[in-house]
Amino acid sequence: EPEVPSFIASKVSQYSCQRKTTLNNYNKKFTDAFEIMAENYEFKENEILCLEFLRAASVLKFLPFPVTRMKDIQGLPCMGDRVRDVIEEIIEEGESSRAKEVLNDERYKSFKQFTSVFGVGVKTSEKWYRMGLRTLEEVKADKTLKLSKMQKAGFLYYEDLVSCVSKAEADAVSLIVKNTVCTFLPDALVTITGGFRRGKKIGHDIDFLITNPGPREDDELLHKGLLLYCDIIESTFVKEQLPSRKIDAMDNFQKCFAILKLYQPRVNNSSYNTSKNFDMAEVKDWKAIRVDLVITPFEQYAYALLGWTGSRQFGRDLRRYATHEKKMILDNHALYDRRERIFLKAGSEEEIFTHLGLDYVEPWERNA
Ligand code: 8DG
Ligand code: MN
Ligand code: MN
């Protein structure tokens, strides 16, 4: 029996920023079910129940052993009745009937398809669903719909974008981005953030943080270059404004949710060469890849790095911890101490953890 003597359930923090969560998940069958439940609540715009299941998933991802009896979750935080019901059923039946119902639910299935398109969120899905649309085929066939520029690109490169990005692809794109950025800004720092910085082997996109030490002259950077699709969002950051208190704060950096054209060496497959229809031009030798490019002023780099490294849940808990345990406000730009009425400067992630009175958590331990 997997018994971990040093493990004390009642000492587990309710905040994932006080836990170390690696990619080694012993409780995937539970956390998968929770994430389906959470996503369904997200589609219903029920933030409270969505977060309840995401927090529970995050606690079980942290457990150093698989849950096999209800006793195993005794004393753990974030285990409300709804969560316990799902756990109990999975222990007894091997699966959750509630999660299964969600997977078969018409509305969930439609929203899942719709939101898989780049540029389509819950709001657009809601609109399409109310119009009676149920599948992506129906959406594509409806010529009265006015798609945004982003959504048009999402449909155009759909197949490439739903197939995930590998670590090798991320490394290849990283070289291209670094080279391109450095031709414009030789001193610029380009860092991969997001899931790949946390050690994930696949992702839905590649996240980059770009900063230029010294005088600011980086506004032009995103406006030039190699992008298939790029919708640039201008920086709206106002100096001295208080950090945002929103739980899922969008930041005000100049950023670009882009699609990059990654050329891939053609596999020399002999069946192509003997084919009657062989035509070099018809073989697609590139893949569309989703890339997030975020430009940050050098003084805010550590905060931006912490925010964009994620995970989303880890970030939410950092902000919740700052607000409720420290009377501070944290976002991707700054940390504000409400008691002292000062902004706390940080040149590294370590310093931000220190400001918050937290033990440092490595990026690969932030997979909450
Ligand atoms: P994945 O791409 O492998 O699926 O996972 P990920 O890398 O963890 O997720 P992500 O959606 O790419 O987001 C990376 C981190 O960036 C995540 O922790 C949340 C954070 N983030 C912000 N601001 C914004 C924003 O405006 N949009 C998005 N999508 N993510 C943001 O701090
Ligand atoms: Mn990502
Ligand atoms: Mn991203």
Image (spheres, rainbow, N blue to C red):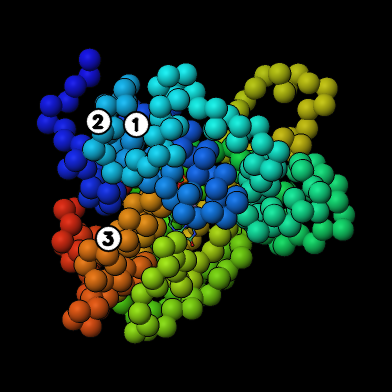
Q: Is residue 61 rendered to the left or right of residue 133?
A: left
Q: Does the residue labelled 1 lie within 8 Å of ligand 1?
A: no
Residue 12: % across, % down? 21, 43
Label 1 CA crowd tier, 10 Å (few <14, some 14–19, many 20+): some
Label drawn at residue 64: 2
Q: Which quadrant is home to the C terminus?
A: top left
Type of amino acid under label 2? Pro
Describe the element under mark 3 as helix, strand or loop: helix
Residue drawn at x 55%, y 71% as measured from the top left: 233
Q: Which comes before the other along the chain, label 1 or label 3?
A: 1
Residue at 37% x, 67% y is: 332
Name the residue that disc number 3 marks: 321
- In this view, the residue farthest toward the front is 81
Label 1 to label 2: alpha-carbon separation: 8 Å
The residues bearing labels 1 and 3 have C-alpha atoms spaced at a distance of 24 Å
Q: Which residue is drawn at 44% across and 24% down?
A: 90
Say left or right for 158 vs 183. right
Residue 290 x, y percent position in the rendering:
56, 50
Query: What amino acid type is highlighted by mark number 1?
Result: Asn
In the image, residue 156 sits, relative to residue 3, either above or below, namely: below
The image position of residue 309, as x and y in percent, is: 36, 53
**Mark 1 — residue?**
25
Which of 178/204 is in front?
A: 204
